[in-house]
C-alpha cells in the first residue's frame, strides 16, 4: 500500500512538473514567436474607427505578467488631429488578455489598467471643447495583412486608473482647475448596459486660489455606448461635510441628450461646507449643530434646451424651503429665460449670518473691516440683467432679520430688457403693514436704482418688544421713503443717493429725557436758571412729524426736520456708514403760538434757535446723541442780552418821546 502511494505521488509530481515545463515552454514560444508590436496598428486603428480620435503608442510594447498577464504599452498618447495639445497621455497601460485567444490569432481584451493618466480638457472663448470637435469622418489607414487579420474582442471586466490627473481650462467661464490623485476602480465593467460597481476618488484644485477639495463617488453604474445611455444608481457622493445619495441618468448623449437626477443629502453645516470654497474667519464659523441644511428632495431634469427643477425641498434648521422652476438656455435670438416659485416657512436670516456679524446687524457700519472699501469699489455684476428674462414668485410664513419680523411675506421679481423690478405686497409688520418696491435699470449707463417703502399703522409699542432702543415713543405711525441712486459700484450708488424719508405719529408719548439734558446744559449759561426744570420725562404730543432729505450721497448735505407740536428740530449733516457714525448740526427751537404749547417755557425763550451738535456712533446710548454747542450758545445769550438792552432802551426812548409829544400838545392847546 505504501509503495502504491509512493508511486502515485511520484507520477503526480512528474505530471505537475511536466505541466509547468509545458506552460513555461508555451509562454517562451508565445513571447518568441508572437511579436507584441504586431498589435500596435490594431489598437490604433480600433480607437480611430470607434471614436474618430488618434491613438499613438510612442513607446515600447512588451509582454508582461505584472500587474496582469497581457500587453504593456509605454508612452501612449491620444489626440484629435486638429489641436496641437494632446487630449490624453499615459505613462504606462497594461491590457489583460485571454491567453487562449492569442493562439487562435485573436486579441481578447479583459482588463484595462492605466498609470499616471493625464487628460487635458479645454474650452475656448466660443464654448468649443477640444474633446467634442466636429471632426470629419475618420478614414482608417490601410491595414497590413498582419494587422487586418487579427480579430479584436473587447470585453473589459475591470478598469483601474491609478494616480490620474485632469487639467480643465474654460476660457468662456474663466475656469482654471485640476483634478489630482484621481483613482478609479470598476469591476465587471462593460459598455453594453449591464450594471457594475464604480468608485472614484480625487482632489479638485482651483488653480486661481489654490483651494483643494477631496471628492469621493461610489455608485452602481451602467453604460450603453451604442444607445448613448449612462445610469448611476445607489450614488454616494462625499464632499465633507456633504453626503449626497440618490440616482442620476444621462440618455442618448450621442444624438439628443437628456438627463435627470433624484438626489437627497444627510444634514450638513453650511459654514463648514462653504469653508471648502472660501476662507472664513474663525469667529464667523457657526457651531457644528447650527446652520443645519438637509436636501430632503431634489428632482431635476434637463436636455439641450434647458433645465426643469421639479422639486427642491430643503430643511433649514427647524423650518423648510421649497423651490421649483424652469430654465431655458439662451439661443441666437433669445435671452436665457427663468421662471420659479419659492416657498418657505419661518425664515430667520440671523441664523444664517456669520457668527461674528449676528450681534452687529443692527448697528450700521459696526461689522465693517479694512477690506470693505475695496469691495465696495468693485464693479457690480449688473450686466447679467441684460442677458436674461426672469420671473419669480416668493412667499414665506415669516422673515426675521436683526430682530425685526415680517409675516406673511409675498413678493414678485421680474427681469426684462435689462430692468429688474421687485414688488412686495403689504406684509404684516407689528400690527401694521410694510410694502416695498425696487427697480434696477442696468440698460442705462450708469445703472439707475429706485427704492420705495411704505409703512402704515405700525405699533411703536409692539416694535419696541423686539427693538428696545426704539422705546422712546409710543403710538401708531406711518412712514414712507423714496430714493434714487446711480452707479455701477456700491460706493457710487451710496454717493449718489437722493430722496426723502418721512414719518408721522399721532397722539404719541415721547421720552424727552435727552432734550431735557440738552437744555439743562444750555441753562448753565442762563441767568434765569434751568429752562427744562419743570418738564416731565415723558410728554404726550398731538402730532409728531419727521423727515430726512438726501442730496447726492450719505456723507453730507442731508436735511433733517422734526416737529413735536411746538418743539422744532432742523439742521444738516451726514452719515458715515463705514464707521457707523452720524454728524448733524441742528437747531432746537421752542415755538410760540399759534403752535400748541405742549412744552412750556418763558415766552422770552420762544422762537430762539439753539445750536446743537449731534455727533456720535449709532451704537452709543441715546442720551449721548446730542449736546449743545456752548460757544455758540454764549453768543445766543449775548445776543438776547443785547436785544433786551435795545428793547429797554427803545421803551425808555419811546416813553420820553411820548412825554415830549404830550407837552407840545398841551403847549399848543394853551395858546
Image (spheres, rainbow, N blue to C red):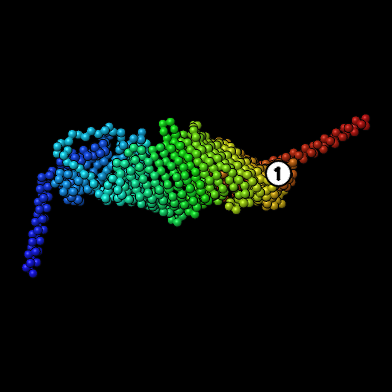
Residue extending farthest bottom: 1
Count of labels in the image: 1
Residue 568 image position (x, y, % from top left):
67, 42
Q: Is residue 658 above or below residue 465?
A: above
The residue lying at 28 percent from left, 42 percent from top is 119
User: Is residue 28 in sight in this rendering?
Assistant: yes
57 or 449: nearer the viewer: 57
Q: Where is residue 537 shown, x and y percent of the image?
A: 67, 52
> x%, y% of residue 509?
67, 50
Relative placement, left or right, of 449 versus 108 is: right
Task: Check the picture and name the quadrant holding the N terminus.
Answer: bottom left
Residue 170: which quarter of the image? top left
Crowd class of label 1 (few under 14; some 14 to 19; many from 20; radius 10 Å) = many
Give above or below for 28 relative to 79: below
Q: Nearer the viewer, residue 254 or 88?
A: 254
The residue positioned 42% from the left and 35% from the top of the image is 330
Residue shown at 79%/39% (left/top)? 651
Question: How far across and how far down the image is residue 191, in percent?
Answer: 28, 45
Q: Secondary structure at mark 1?
A: loop
Residue bearing the label numbered 1: 566
Q: Residue at x 52, y 50 (%)?
A: 345
**Residue 2 vs residue 522: left or right?**
left
Q: Nearer the viewer, residue 35 or 474?
A: 35
Q: Is residue 553 visible?
A: no
Quadrant containing the C terminus in the rendered view: top right
Amino acid at each position: 500500500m505504501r509503495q502504491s502511494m509512493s508511486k502515485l505521488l511520484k507520477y503526480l509530481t512528474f505530471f505537475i512538473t511536466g505541466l509547468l515545463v509545458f506552460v513555461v515552454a508555451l509562454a517562451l514560444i508565445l513571447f518568441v514567436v508572437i511579436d507584441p508590436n504586431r498589435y500596435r496598428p490594431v489598437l490604433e486603428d480600433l480607437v480611430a474607427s470607434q471614436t474618430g480620435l488618434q491613438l499613438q503608442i510612442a513607446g515600447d510594447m512588451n509582454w508582461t505578467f505584472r500587474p496582469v498577464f497581457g500587453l504593456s504599452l509605454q508612452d501612449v498618447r491620444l489626440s484629435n488631429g486638429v489641436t496641437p495639445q494632446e487630449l490624453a497621455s499615459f505613462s504606462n497601460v497594461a491590457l489583460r488578455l485571454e491567453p487562449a485567444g492569442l493562439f487562435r490569432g485573436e486579441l481578447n481584451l479583459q482588463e484595462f489598467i492605466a498609470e499616471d493618466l493625464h487628460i487635458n480638457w479645454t474650452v475656448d472663448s466660443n464654448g468649443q471643447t477640444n474633446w467634442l470637435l466636429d471632426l470629419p469622418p475618420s478614414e482608417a489607414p490601410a491595414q497590413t495583412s498582419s494587422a487586418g487579420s487579427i480579430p479584436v474582442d473587447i470585453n473589459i471586466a475591470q478598469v483601474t486608473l491609478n494616480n490620474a490627473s485632469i487639467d480643465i481650462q474654460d476660457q468662456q467661464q474663466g475656469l482654471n482647475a485640476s483634478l489630482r490623485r484621481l483613482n478609479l476602480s470598476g469591476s465587471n465593467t462593460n459598455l453594453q448596459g449591464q450594471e457594475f460597481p464604480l468608485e472614484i476618488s480625487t482632489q479638485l484644485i482651483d488653480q486661481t486660489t489654490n483651494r483643494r477639495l477631496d471628492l469621493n463617488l461610489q455608485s452602481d453604474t451602467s453604460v450603453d455606448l451604442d444607445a448613448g445611455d449612462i445610469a448611476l444608481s445607489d450614488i454616494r457622493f462625499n464632499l465633507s461635510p456633504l453626503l449626497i445619495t440618490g440616482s442620476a441618468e444621462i440618455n442618448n448623449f450621442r444624438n439628443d441628450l437628456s438627463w435627470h437626477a433624484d438626489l437627497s443629502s444627510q444634514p450638513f453645516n453650511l459654514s463648514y461646507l462653504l469653508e471648502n470654497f472660501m476662507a472664513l474667519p474663525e469667529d464667523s464659523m457657526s457651531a457644528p449643530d447650527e446652520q443645519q441644511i438637509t436636501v430632503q428632495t431634489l428632482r431635476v431634469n434637463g436636455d439641450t434646451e434647458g433645465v426643469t427643477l421639479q422639486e427642491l425641498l430643503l430643511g433649514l434648521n427647524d423650518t423648510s424651503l421649497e423651490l421649483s422652476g424652469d430654465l431655458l438656455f439662451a439661443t441666437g435670438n433669445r435671452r436665457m429665460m427663468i421662471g420659479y416659485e419659492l416657498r418657505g416657512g419661518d425664515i430667520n436670516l440671523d441664523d444664517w449670518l456669520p457668527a461674528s456679524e449676528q450681534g452687529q446687524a443692527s448697528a450700521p457700519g459696526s461689522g465693517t473691516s479694512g477690506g470693505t472699501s475695496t469691495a465696495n469699489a468693485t464693479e457690480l455684476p449688473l450686466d447679467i440683467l441684460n442677458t436674461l428674462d426672469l420671473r419669480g414668485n416668493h412667499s414665506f410664513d415669516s422673515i426675521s432679520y436683526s430682530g425685526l419680523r415680517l409675516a406673511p411675506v409675498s413678493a414678485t421679481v421680474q427681469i426684462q430688457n435689462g430692468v429688474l423690478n421687485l414688488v412686495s405686497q403689504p406684509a404684516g409688520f407689528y400690527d401694521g403693514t410694510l410694502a416695498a418696491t425696487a427697480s434696477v435699470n442696468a440698460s442705462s449707463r450708469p445703472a439707475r436704482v429706485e427704492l420705495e417703502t411704505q409703512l402704515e399703522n405700525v405699533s411703536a409699542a409692539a416694535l419696541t418688544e423686539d427693538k428696545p432702543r426704539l422705546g422712546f415713543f409710543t403710538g401708531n405711525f406711518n412712514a414712507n421713503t423714496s430714493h434714487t441712486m446711480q452707479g455701477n459700484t456700491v460706493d457710487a450708488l451710496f454717493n449718489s443717493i437722493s430722496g426723502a424719508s418721512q414719518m408721522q405719529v399721532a397722539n404719541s408719548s415721547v421720552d424727552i429725557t435727552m432734550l431735557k439734558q440738552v437744555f439743562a446744559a444750555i441753562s448753565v449759561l442762563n441767568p434765569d436758571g434751568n429752562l427744562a426744570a419743570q418738564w416731565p420725562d415723558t410728554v404726550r404730543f398731538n402730532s409728531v412729524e419727521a423727515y430726512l432729505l438726501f442730496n447726492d450721497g450719505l456723507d453730507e448735505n442731508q436735511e433733517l426736520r422734526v416737529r413735536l407740536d411746538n418743539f422744532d428740530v432742523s439742521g444738516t449733516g451726514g452719515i458715515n456708514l463705514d464707521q457707523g457714525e452720524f454728524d448733524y448740526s441742528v437747531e432746537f427751537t421752542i415755538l410760540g403760538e399759534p403752535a400748541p404749547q405742549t412744552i412750556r417755557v418763558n415766552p422770552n425763550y420762544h422762537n430762539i434757535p439753539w445750536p446743537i451738535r449731534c455727533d456720535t456712533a449709532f451704537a452709543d446710548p441715546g442720551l449721548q446723541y446730542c449736546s449743545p454747542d456752548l460757544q455758540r450758545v454764549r453768543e445766543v445769550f449775548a445776543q438776547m442780552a443785547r436785544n433786551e438792552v435795545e428793547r429797554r432802551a427803545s421803551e425808555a426812548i419811546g416813553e420820553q418821546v411820548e412825554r415830549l409829544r404830550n407837552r407840545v400838545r398841551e403847549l399848543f392847546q394853551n395858546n
